[in-house]
Amino acid sequence: MIKLALSGWDLSNCVLFQNYEAEDVLGLSAEEIVTVVRYMLSEARGTSPLEDAVRLIGQRMDVLRACCRGNPTLVNAVIDFLVERIAQKQ
């Protein structure tokens, strides 16, 4: 049996996470990121009251942000899709 002695491990020495940027393992296209947003909206649509739906979308924002990774093409695709959805509702 092997035991690990972690008592001397100091988290302050772990600098990897301070500037860590997740790798883009999904490599989503603009069409695929819009599908992610559609899933998010669909999930929220089935939630009530409205405050819970808003909270649920808020919880998914980190996932969406990670998927976009600051890529202007993906960010613009999300914005264009949402603007189009808002225009349809008016």
Image (tube, grey):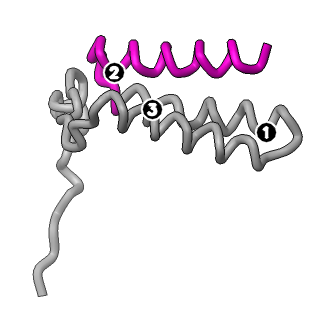
Q: Quadrant of residue 11?
A: top left
Is there a contact, CB below 8 Å, between mark 2 and mark 3?
no
Residue 85: mark? none
Marks 2/3: CA–CA distance: 8 Å
Image position of 85 with respect to 11: above or below: above
Instruction: Residue at the far left: name it.
Output: 2
Q: Nearer the viewer, mark 1 or mark 3?
A: 3
Q: Amino acid at mark 2?
A: Leu
* SS under mark 2: helix
Give the percent coordinates (x, y) of residue 30. Answer: 33, 28
Is there a contact, CB below 8 Å, between mark 1 and mark 3?
no
* SS under mark 3: helix
Residue corresponding to mark 2:
74
- In the displayed structure image, the side of residue 52 where residue 14 appears, left or right: left
Q: Does label 1 or label 3 sit earlier along the sequence?
A: 3
Q: Which residues are magenta?
A: 67-90
Could you classify mark 3 by the number of other residues whose Cα lies within 10 Å: few (under 14), some (14-19), or many (20 or more)? many
Which residue is at 65% across, 47% downward? Answer: 43
| Magenta-colored segment: predominant secondary structure | helix
Question: For this rendering, which residue is in front, 23 or 27?
Answer: 27
Marks 2/1: CA–CA distance: 27 Å
Is there a contact, CB below 8 Å, between mark 2 and mark 1?
no
* Viewport quadrant of the N terminus: bottom left
Image position of 34 with respect to 84: above or below: below
Residue 34: mark? 3
Q: Does label 2 or label 3 sit earlier along the sequence?
A: 3
Give the percent coordinates (x, y) of residue 31. Answer: 36, 33
Q: Amino acid at mark 1?
A: Asp
Residue corresponding to mark 1:
52
Which residue is at 21% across, 28% downward? Answer: 20
Which residue is at 85% across, 44% downward? Answer: 48
Question: For this rendering, which residue is in front, 52 or 14?
Answer: 52
